[in-house]
Every structure is written in C-alpha cells, then in structure tokens.
Amino acid sequence: MGSVGLLKNSAMVCAPLMAPSVEQLVHDMLQAKAQGADLVEIRLDAIHNFQPHKDLPLLLTSKPLPVLILYRPIWEGNQFEDDAHKQLEVLRWAKELGADYVELDLKIHNDSNCRILIASDFTKKEKSRWRSGCKIITSCFVDNATSKEDLSQVVAYMQSAGADILKIVTNANDITELEKTFHLLSHCQVPLIAYSVGERGLISQLLGPKFGSVLLYGSLDGNAVPGLPSLGSLRQAYGVDFMDNDTKVFGLISKPVGHSKGPILHNPTFRHVGYNGIYVPMFVDDLKEFFRVYSSPDFAGFSVGIPYKEAVVSFCDEVDPFAKSIGAVNTIIRRPCDGKLIGYNTDLNGRTNGSDFLPSPLARKLFVLVGAGGAGRALAFGAKSRGARIVIFDIDFDRAKALAVAVSGEALPFENLASFQPEKGAILANATPIGMHPNKDRIPVPEGTLKDYAVVFDAVYTPRMTTLLKEAEAAGAITVSGVEMFLRQAIGQFNLFTGSKAPEEFMREIVMAKF
C-alpha cells in the first residue's frame, strides 16, 4: 500500500476575492484565512469607484495573510496604452505598500500568423527596479491551444518577460484537454500555475499539486464558483497538502458529476489507512477519448456513474464474471502489471444482492423498478434472486425490455407509469436521477399511488432524505435511503482501489455525519 507523504508539498492555496468595497475585501480576507487559505488574490478592478491612493493603503495595511494584487485594464481599442500604463502604476504602488505578489496580464495577438506577447511597457528593466520583496506573476489566457507544443511555445514567450512565476489559464471544452496542462506542469522548468476554468476543468485545480503547480485556487465556503473547489474541500475532503508525484488518481466518471459525495468519503479514508491516493469528480463527455487520453498508471481506477455503467463495459479489457452477468460496471481498476482496465460491479458488493437492505421479504412480492440503468440492473438481479415479481419502467423502453428478459420480469412503457396502479404491499425502487440535487422536488411515480407501497427505496443519495422518501413515509411506507447502497458499493470500491480491506466502521461514521 502506498503511503501518504509526510512532508507538505509547496503548492499554495489561494482564495480569489472580488468585492465592490474595501471593507468587504478586508472581511473576506479574514474569512479566507480562517478557512485555510495561504494567500488571497484581490481583484482591484472589481472595487466600485476604485481610488488607488486611498484604497490600496487600507487593503494592504489590514491584510491578515499574504496578498496577490491583480488589476485588469480593459485592453480594448484606443484605451489599450492608457489602461496598460494605469495598470503598471497601480501595481508599482501596491508593491511599495507591501503586496506579496502582483500579477500582470500578457496579451497574445496574432499578426501574420506570428504570436506576439504584449505586456504593456512592463520590460525587464522596469521590473528590476522593484523586484525585491514582491514576486511578479505574468499570466496569459489561452483560449484554443490545440497541442502540448502550443502551450510550450506560450511558456517560452512568457519566460522572456523574466517573471518569477508564470500562469497559464485555458478554457476546457472537454476533460481530455486537461492532459496538456498536466504535461506542461510536469515538464516546465520554471515555477508555473496552470489550470482550466469551468466544470470540465475542475480536476486541473484538484490535481495541480501532483503535477507541480505552485498555486491552486479555492472559493470561500458558501460562495460557490463553477469549476472551483471550496477552501474547505481542498483542505478537508481532498487533502491537497500531502499530494505528491506518486499520488494515485481515482475518480468518478459521470455526467453530471457535481452531486457526487464520493470525494468526502474516499479521500479521508485513504488518509485514514495511509494510502497515497486522491479521488476526484470527472465530468466525462466521451468515454472512448477519455480512456485513450488518460492511459497512464497515474490514473489508477475509476468509479462509474450515470449514464455510463452499461456503456463502459465495452471499454474494459476484462470484465469480472459477476459484472458481466449484470451487464453493468461501476468500478474499473487499471491492473498495475500490464495497464489493462478491469471492470467490476460493487452495487451488489460482490457478495450480497442488491435488495438485502430492504427490510421486507421479497418472495412473490411485486417489485416495481423505475430505471433500467446500471443501478437498476443491480437491483433487478437482486430482486430476482429473492423471488420477486418484477415490473420495469425506463424512458428507454428497449432497455427496459432487455432487462425484463434477463430477470424474467415485465417491461412497461415509461409513459404508463403515470397511470400505473400497484397492488397493495408492493415494493418500489427508484433507480433514476429523478429527485437528485438540484431537482429535488420531483418524484418518479404519482403521489397518490404511494399509499399502496409497503416499502419504497430510492437509489438517489443527495439529498439523503429525498422528496420521494418523505412523501412515501407520510403515506405510511417503510422507506430506505440510497445512502446504504452507496456505502456498500463504496466499501467494495475501496477494497478494489487499494487492494486491502476497507475500514467499514470509519466509512460508515463519515456517511452518517456528512450525508
């Protein structure tokens, strides 16, 4: 088992702050420090009616932690030179008042197919006048770098400006584009910050310390920013302080992925047992391209979520017989000896059947299943093994029919669910995303039929008590949360990820406290 590094890596956690007033920024700096930030980035151009000689002294004499000053001019038309000059003067003044870092934007212009970097009149000669005590970051937004060579060329140009730290930000349209960023970080010979923005770019922030980024960003808790982890999650859930080059990467392949609770369960458990791994959400659009790009041993295993549990089977080099019999994979391990992808299904935990947590005998009971995807298949096979009569609804009727044949059940069109009348004492299992955060108010069946179900199970675990479960409980049914199913499959996944026995009680305590 790999061990967690004992020494903290050198990556700093930065909280970007934007507020319309100096007073709010001072308050936010205190909040950032309390939440674990190493420094804050202050956007001066967000301050309403910004007055450098009045506002900068108030900010920098009140700072409770190191400060990075960023001031972005308009960079448009005839104002370009004026704004560039104003930017330089403001940054000079910030340095004199004690800023720890200042950041200067570099603009890329295409001229006769040649890329030219323009950084106002901020020359090496200018910079050498006030280098001491203040580090200079030069940054560049690259919108459409198509190759690793493109990014490397941008870095080479940026190095010529002679800054202390370089920063490259890209706009990821697909998670596979982030591999270029990881390659750049791993091979750059100068201090570099590199990441992509947006939900598909999230892992570039989370994995930055593994690949060598000197800084990563986290939002203030309670002030979520798309594609940006919170300060609290960076420190507590992901444990970024102790990531190193040898950290193994595991992640949830899903679309969407923001609902996942896996990171707050797997990462603390890795640290609890001393395993050098990190578990991250992976927003994947194209399975084939994803597995082609992320083929290195660094990416050691994956959970598989909606909507890929069935489709992913064809991308595995081998599939465990149990998963093959179900026709769905929720866990993939990259075998260390040959790099092959091995698929498993832990929705049934390999030993138990998927209906074990339902507190009612299933023999001869009507088992109404909504959703014939990966989780639904696991539940259907579990119900079959316990003698239930199974009726299946799915928006894809062909998929429902195929599962019904496999479990000797009956498939009905999804539109019939609105008028379907179950027999008294039936069992209902929701294995669709209906009711999942953020669309928490929806339920998959008519509310009036809930009185006829003796037991209602919801595979959705965010929120823990879904609207379906609340209304079923009010109608008199026994309710079972998807949290139990989630815990059991996570224990199975942890065993496969680490090759050792999961600390089940520790994991249960996290689930009960955090979910």
Image (cartoon, grey):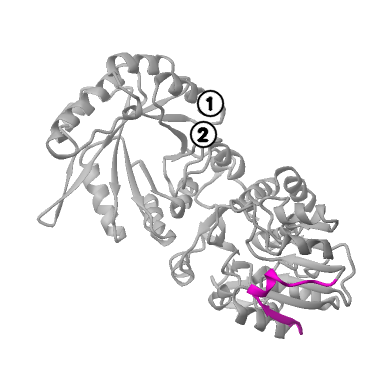
Residue topped by disc 1: 31
The kind of secondary structure element at disc 2 is loop
Would residue 411 be counted in the magenta stretch? Answer: yes
Q: What residue span does the magenta drawing correspond to?
A: 407-423
Residue at the image point whose x is 43% and y is 23% from the top:
25
Q: Quadrant for residue 450, please give it.
A: bottom right
Left or right of residue 57, residue 348 in this image: right
Residue topped by disc 2: 220
Residue at the image point whose x is 51% and y is 36% from the top:
223
Amino acid bearing label 1:
Gln
Please rate how many residues cluster around mark 1, counting C-alpha atoms within 10 Å: few if below 14, some from 14 to 19, many from 20: some
Residue at the image point whose x is 50% and y is 31% from the top:
37
**Residue contact between numbered discs 2 and 1, judged by CB atoms under 8 Å:** yes
**Residue 188 seen in the figure:** no
Query: In the rendered view, would you say 244 is above or below 90?
Result: below
Look at the image and tell me in which quarter the N terminus lies: bottom right
The kind of secondary structure element at disc 1 is helix
Query: In the rendered view, would you say 431 is above or below 277?
Result: below
Where residue 308 sits in the image (x, y, percent)?
57, 69
Q: CA distance from mark 2 to mark 1?
A: 7 Å
Where residue 204 sits in the image (x, y, percent)?
44, 50
Residue, far left: 112
Would residue 142 be counted in the magenta stretch? Answer: no
Amino acid bearing label 2:
Leu
Query: In the rendered view, would you say 205 is above or below 374?
Result: above
Please rate how many residues cluster around mark 2, counting C-alpha atoms within 10 Å: few if below 14, some from 14 to 19, many from 20: many
Query: In the rendered view, would you say 332 is above or below 163?
Result: below
Where residue 325 sits in the image (x, y, percent)?
70, 80
Compare residues 395 and 408 and report the one nearer the observer. Answer: 395
Where residue 311 sits in the image (x, y, percent)?
56, 74
Left or right of residue 184, residue 26 in this image: right
